[in-house]
Amino acid sequence: MSSLFLLQVMQNIQSPSPSLPVGSVEQVAQLSVWELAQKGGWIMVVLGLLSLIAIYLFVVKLLELRSASSEDPSFIDRMKDYVSTERMDAALSLCEKTNTPLSRVLGKLLPRQDRSMQEKMVVVENAGNVEAGKLQKNMPLLATIAAAAPMIGFLGTVTGMVRAFFDMASASQAVDLGVLSSGIYEALVTTVGGLIVGIITLFIYNFLVARINSVLNRVEANALEVAEFLQDRQ
């Protein structure tokens, strides 16, 4: 709304109206994305850094989740086989070698096989919370970027409008569009950049949250299955 108001004010400014040179039209038509981003000023540098951080966190978290979900299909069966034959040392050794969220939860559960089912469920829940904390590491930072990027873009809009009005007020004669162009670019480009970074990061965040919940649900289901198996053997 504020940007539209600025444009309306500019349209009402009385200034010389020479015909626009053909070269100027061609220059606008050939404006690249990089050149357009440079018009946004230092705010675009901040948004660029935030986008790089978001991409880095996305790649790191995606690889981490892929490793966490790459469970051996025969892992549970082998675990039950070791428990059935009372080879607890082999079961614990398998958990240490596998080194996944599920194996780490079972590594906490197996030494407590003689406890009640309620105590086993508490162990599974506590160990699951620890694994959830590991998988959710840096997720608040992604959420912060998703929320802060549009606000930073709006900050660039405000600073750009202030600059445009300052240039307009400082002009001794009729205001030319060229005097206000840098402020207008900063006002509009930063808004677009902030929204783009915020929207993309929001999609990334929600995608990763869904993947994390899927991994944790599978870990909890498999751990409870082993806990019930241990309970039935008592």
Image: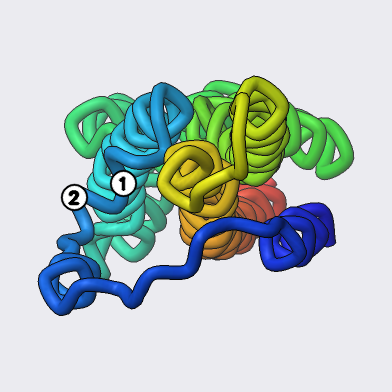
What secondary structure is found at the residue carrying circle 1? helix
Q: Nearer the viewer, residue 15 or 191?
A: 15
What residue is at 52 percent from the left and 34 percent from the top?
Answer: 105
**Cβ–Cβ below 8 Å for labels 2 and 1?**
yes
Q: Nearer the viewer, residue 176 or 106?
A: 176
Q: List x then y, in percent, for residue 67.
A: 24, 48
Q: Is residue 174 above or below residue 42?
A: below
Q: List x then y, in percent, for residue 211.
A: 49, 61
Marks 2/1: CA distance?
5 Å
Asked if residue 181 lies left or right of residue 125, the reply is left
What residue is at 56 percent from the left and 60 percent from the top?
Answer: 199
Quadrant in the rendering for residue 222:
bottom right
Q: Which mark is residue 37?
A: 1
Identify which amino acid the numbered label 1 is placed on: Ala
Do we see residue 110 in this rendering? no
Asked if residue 231 lies left or right of residue 202, the reply is right
Instruction: Report which residue position mark 2 lands on.
Output: 34
Asked if residue 40 lies left or right of residue 150, the reply is left
What residue is at 16 percent from the left and 61 percent from the top?
Answer: 32
The image quadrant where one finds the N terminus is bottom right
